[in-house]
Amino acid sequence: MNISEQEQDIVIVGGGISGLATALALRRKGIKSMVLERSETLRAAVVGIIMQPNGWRALDQLGVAAKLRQTCTEIPSGVFISVAEGKCRESELPLGKGELRCLKRMELMKALAEELPVESVYLGCRAVSILLDPLTSNPLLQLHDGTLIKAKIVIGCDGVNSIISKFVGVNSPKLFSRCATRGFTYYEGGHSFGDKFRFYSSNDVTLGQLPVTDKLVYWFLTRVLTSQDLSDAKKDPAYITKASLEAIKGFPEEIVELVKNTEPNTLYLTELRYRAPWDLVRTKFRKGTVVVAGDAMHAMCPFISQGGGASLEDAVVLARCLSEKLKQAAEGGGKRLVEEALDEYLRERRMRVFWLSLQTYFIGLAQDNTSKVKKALGIAGLILVFGDQTSHTDYDCGHL
């Protein structure tokens, strides 16, 4: 690895969606950055990502939306299907006002990475610690091989178990009582599901199914978390398939076949972790010129499919705030202006991600059949606070 010993202006820790999007947003504003990714290749879980209107607005600002639209089908409407005793009752599933599509996560990663200079992304670079230089108060990043990187600004985009978020004082994410399974099913002759988002619900199980193309369907399932789901079994496609089929007994036959025929290498089972909504209000998220974005800031359960979209919004807002202050910093007062820019970014993002997290939290409680009190609290919260449960898609992160 050849990393210059000179001080870097901006170092982004994490080369996932959040890190790449932040680097690209900065590049669009003429600001260079260095991305450190722990893996030897840019990788993403083989899953889909539901991109709603607010996410497409951010992708338009990043300049990659047109390319991504060519990879997936637009989804104009949705159907909610209640399953009970083998019978299905359908009703309308409200979607946001605007564009909704399901992307392959890796397609999104590629689209972002292709717009960045190759030399700006360093692979196989795992940050193991961070501290502030006692003389300059600038961040010092230590990598797994002993390399020490001096930076003026560090942006932590290193996910749920972020070392940067720990450094700035963010509480560890909490384990939720449910898990999620995801997969892709390919239909050689084309599928018959059309262009609708179908969402099935039965007791403790929910399953969503969306077309990616006319031959590819993405599905996700949430159910109660078990001890086996936290063991190595969660990496075994046979176990994932068996557990999923057990969960959807009584579902329509075409959904059972959808799960049965899923390509094993696309099956992905994970526990759900989240940052409590109240932590998002009281946590500072900045220490000196170190800040966090994406899941490192606001990990949330996937019940409203906003984790990816919110991370893209972070990137646009952060780059805009930094750009405005860095222009002034050229005339002096650099560090103070950078800190002001980061505070401005956090002010703009804090309540947005709080409301997203609160809504997912209430939905999680409403799905919790282990406690009548929790379930009632979740339902009441959704009714009283979130009358329009699709309004989160109306958000506009603004121009870069």
Image (cartoon, rainbow, N blue to C red):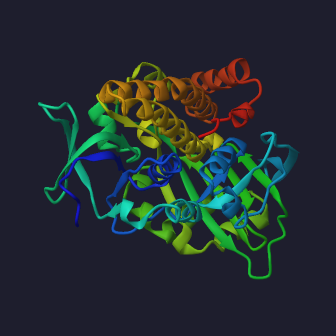
Q: Position of residue 30 (x, y in %)?
A: 48, 48
Q: What residue lies at 12% left-to-right and 31% top-to-bottom? A: 134
On the image, which quarter does residue 133 sit in?
Answer: top left
The quarter of the image holding the N terminus is bottom left
Q: How many numbered callouts?
A: 0
Q: Position of residue 350 (x, y in %)?
A: 51, 26
In depth, the one of 284 and 340 nearer the eye is: 340
**Left or right: where 259 falls relative to 138:** right
The quarter of the image holding the C terminus is top right
Q: Position of residue 224 (x, y in %)?
A: 54, 45
In depth, the one of 93 and 10 nearer the eye is: 10
Q: Is residue 236 visible?
A: yes
Q: What residue lies at 38% left-to-right and 61% top-to-bottom? A: 121
Q: Position of residue 101 (x, y in %)?
A: 73, 55
Q: What residue lies at 84% left-to-right and 69% top-to-bottom? A: 192
**Left or right: where 123 falls relative to 210:** left
In depth, the one of 346 and 245 nearer the eye is: 346
Tell me: residue 321, above or below residue 31.
Answer: above
Tell me: residue 135, above or below residue 81.
Answer: above
**Left or right: where 127 falls relative to 133:** right
Tell me: residue 323, above or below residue 28.
Answer: above
Q: Is residue 169 visible?
A: no
